[in-house]
Image (cartoon, rainbow, N blue to C red):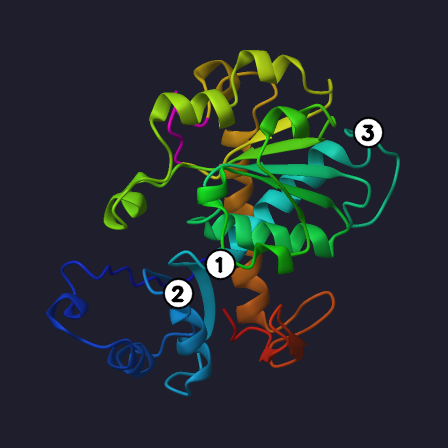
Amino acid sequence: LSADVINFSAKGSSVSKGESLKDTALTLQAMGADAVVIRHQASGAPHTLATAGWTDCAVVNAGDGTHQHPTQALLDAYTLRRHLVGAGGTQDVTGRDLAGQHVAIVGDVLHSRVARSNVQLLHTLGARVTLVAPPTLVPVGVQTWPCAVSYHLDEVLAQGPDAVMMLRVQRERMSSAGGGFFPSALEYTRGYGLDARRLAGLPDHAIVMHPGPMNRGLEISADAADSPRSVVVEQVANGVAVRMAVLYLLLSGTGPATSAGDEVVDESGTPEKVGTGA
């Protein structure tokens, strides 16, 4: 896109010396930044940056804690469209929706910002979403999400989902919380891992997805990760194009339906400005 880029992380920057999010934002504003792509350990940090009035930059949420990861959901939806709808898929339809598609999202839903964003976007596009996880890895309040919830992977796979999205088991977050989310890695794999046997039972057109990085041998076997059904590497490639499009639409101020500054309503019912929200 020919933009000038400033890269910095908390480690080695003024943030590691105690600089607040506000002061970081004011510094970027003073440097003349037009957009900020932020990944932050604190849920809600991008929203705060976008709405606090510290900067007039466009803000892109690249993942905030266990809250949301919007651009991952966008690239996942794009990947699903390419494989399941239209010329290369099971339906002869046009448009941008995923109506009629069944997506199973399997694994560590509790700690997954990817799952949260995907449930919202895929539901908006008309897909039927089923979350599959052990009871200990299902968030409180999940009954308010626009999806079904199951604790039994084989029962969901027997329904013939069009796509199975495996989630990484986030052991680093589990360790910080004291562990105890499942008895052992072996027990987790037996109950919720995608292996060659489960893969063989999927419909012929079904695809396997994973936001990465993968824990091979835990939530997904090498057979499943490297199978012709796997679109994991394609997801990465699609992410480049999708994120380029996000930046282009925000910085150019143009879009197919809305432009920067237009009001939309997020999943909590709170109005936000397009191009400034997380």
Does 210 appear above or below 270?
Answer: above
Span colored in magenta: 213-219
The structure residue drawn at horizontal position 88% and vertical position 40%, both measured from the top left corner, is 93
Tag 1: Cα neighbours inside 10 Å, few (<14), some, or many (≥20)?
A: many
Look at discs 3 and 1 and give the one toward the viewer. 1
Residue, x 70% and y 32% (percent of image)?
Answer: 83
Q: CA distance from mark 2 to mark 1?
A: 8 Å
Using the image, tell me which numbered label, if any, was put on residue 90: 3
Is the C-beta separation of discs 2 and 1 under 8 Å? yes
Q: Secondary structure at mark 1?
A: loop
Q: Where's residue 44, x and y in %?
A: 42, 69
Q: Residue at x 30, y 76 (%)?
A: 28
* 113 up-or-down from 20: above or below: above
Mark 2 or mark 3, which has the lower sequence index?
A: 2
Horizontal arrangement in the rendering, residue 244 relative to residue 143 (left or right)? left
Q: From the top left corner, tell me how far across and down residue 204 is, in percent.
A: 73, 17
User: Is residue 144 visible to the viewer in this orientation of the structure?
Assistant: yes
Judge depth for marks 2 and 3 and give the one in front.
2
Q: Residue furthest right?
A: 92
Report if residue 214 lies within the magenta region: yes
Few, some or many C-alpha atoms within 10 Å of disc 3 (few <14, some 14-19, many ≥20)? some
Q: Residue furthest bottom?
A: 53
Q: Residue furthest left?
A: 17
The amino acid type of the residue labelled 3 equals Thr
Nearer the N terminus, badge 3 or badge 1?
1
Which residue carries the number 2 mark? 43
* The disc label shown at residue 68, or none: 1
* Sequence order check, earlier mark of 2 and 1: 2
Q: Amino acid at mark 1?
A: Gln
Q: Is residue 13 left or right of residue 130?
A: left
Residues at marks 3 and 1, CA–CA distance in whole angstroms: 30 Å
